[in-house]
């Protein structure tokens, strides 16, 4: 204190200067994410309107009379212009995102029941992808030789195997011969953590194989690329050990492209889960989407779209934030 006045802490002001660009960066990305989500929801809603399927006929069946179909269409509001139908759907959002035309449950209730199985599969497959794919790519990129050649063979094989075929093979061979692992179905974590874990082994394996190959291949290429740069040779000339160079420099510089691949695989898992859930008889978002399409259940389809859009936007936002922390130039852009 001098002359009765407090002096500002220079360290605090420096921290504020560093945090302010990051905060603005996150706010810009969040605003873009919200705008993207709204645009996707609006586009999908009106694309579903031109599908040519009569929801009233789909719900009542082919034996229903024209009068019954017309009455049901009036109840659902599908006889109105698309803009009015969109307004009706928006007004129903506060009421649990609307109600399913087929089950009369609110969409939030359906998502609360169908969401955990799909999220368990997605999170499990991404964790397995990271824990298996990154070490394989790292070993192949550092050691090269036979390990690298084996990785290339495994990558080609993983990409050549369709996920649904692998899922059926796992059900017909492993699950039926190993009584400990459930062949089909899903046990909630709150009911039995052990059965929940065992029930996820096969579907997570079927989902994760191609993701492991993608992440391992990308990380291997990134590690090789970083090792070939001039600064690595400079570090070696200064006497740094290979371990120090690897863990302090190579991994950090090789990570950003791999983070992108992991984020993309996180999104792709949602699409892959549709078939895997069918094979393993798991009542998740994939089966919810298929049932909604078969029944022309517009609120249920839009519920899946909203949930999927939020997941995609959330993953993308986390990716942007991770890049912003790792690379200050991204924040300035």
Image (cartoon, helix red, strand yellow):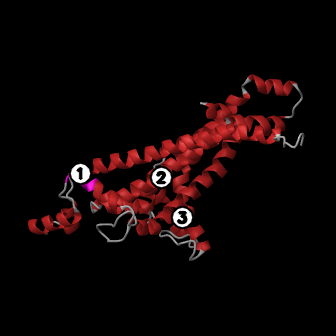
Asked which quadrant contains residue 21, the reply is top right
Mark 1–mark 2 CB contact (< 8 Å): no
- Bin the neighbour count of mark 2 within 10 Å (Cα to Cα): few under 14, some 14-19, many 20 and up: some
Viewer-nearest residue: 248 or 211 = 248
Left/right of residue 202 with respect to residue 5 in the rendered view: left
Q: Where does the magenta region start and end?
A: 81-86
Q: Position of residue 324 (x, y in %)?
A: 64, 38
Instruction: List the residue tagged with mark 2.
Output: 310
- Bin the neighbour count of mark 1 within 10 Å (Cα to Cα): few under 14, some 14-19, many 20 and up: some
Q: Position of residue 281 (x, y in %)?
A: 43, 67
Instruction: List the residue tagged with mark 3.
Output: 174
Disc 1 and disc 2: Cα gap in Å?
A: 24 Å
Q: Position of residue 113 (x, y in %)?
A: 45, 69
Q: Residue furthest front?
A: 3
Asked which quadrant contains residue 92, the reply is bottom left
Q: Position of residue 18 (x, y in %)?
A: 71, 38
Please, what is the dominant secondary structure of the magenta stretch? helix
Instruction: List the residue tagged with mark 1.
Output: 82
Residue at position x 57%, y 55% in the image: 125
Whether residue 116 appears in magenta in the rendering, the answer is no
Marked residue nearer the N-terminal end (1 or 2): 1
Tell me the SS state at disc 3. Answer: helix
């Amino acid at each position: 204190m001098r002359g009765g006045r407090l002096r500002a802490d220079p360290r605090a002001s420096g921290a504020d200067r560093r945090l302010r660009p990051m905060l603005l960066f996150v706010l810009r990305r969040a605003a873009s994410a919200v705008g993207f989500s709204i645009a996707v929801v609006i586009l999908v809603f009106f694309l579903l309107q031109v599908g040519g399927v009569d929801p009233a006929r789909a719900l009542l069946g082919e034996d229903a009379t024209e009068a019954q179909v017309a009455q049901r269409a009036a109840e659902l509001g599908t006889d109105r212009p698309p803009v009015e139908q969109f307004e009706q759907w928006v007004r129903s959002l506060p009421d649990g995102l609307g109600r399913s035309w087929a089950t009369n449950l609110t969409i939030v209730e359906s998502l609360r029941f169908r969401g955990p199985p799909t999220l368990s599969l997605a999170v499990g497959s991404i964790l397995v992808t990271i824990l298996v794919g990154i070490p394989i790519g790292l070993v192949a990129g550092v050691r090269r030789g036979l390990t690298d050649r084996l990785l290339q063979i495994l990558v080609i094989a993983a990409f050549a195997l369709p996920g649904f075929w692998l899922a059926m093979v796992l059900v017909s061979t492993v699950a039926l011969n190993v009584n400990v692992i459930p062949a089909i179905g899903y046990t909630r974590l709150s009911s039995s953590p052990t059965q929940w874990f065992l029930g996820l082994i096969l579907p997570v394996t079927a989902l994760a194989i191609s993701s492991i190959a993608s992440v391992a291949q990308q990380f291997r290429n990134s590690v090789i690329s970083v090792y070939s740069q001039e600064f690595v040779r400079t570090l070696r000339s200064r006497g740094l050990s290979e371990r120090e160079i690897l863990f302090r420099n190579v991994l950090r510089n090789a990570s950003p492209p791999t983070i992108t691949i992991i984020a993309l695989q996180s999104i792709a898992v949602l699409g892959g889960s549709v078939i895997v859930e069918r094979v393993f008889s798991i009542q998740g978002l994939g089966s919810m989407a298929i049932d909604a399409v078969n029944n022309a259940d517009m609120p249920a389809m839009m519920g899946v779209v909203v949930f999927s859009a939020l997941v995609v936007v959330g993953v993308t936002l986390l990716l942007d934030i991770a890049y912003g922390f790792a690379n200050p130039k991204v924040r300035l852009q």
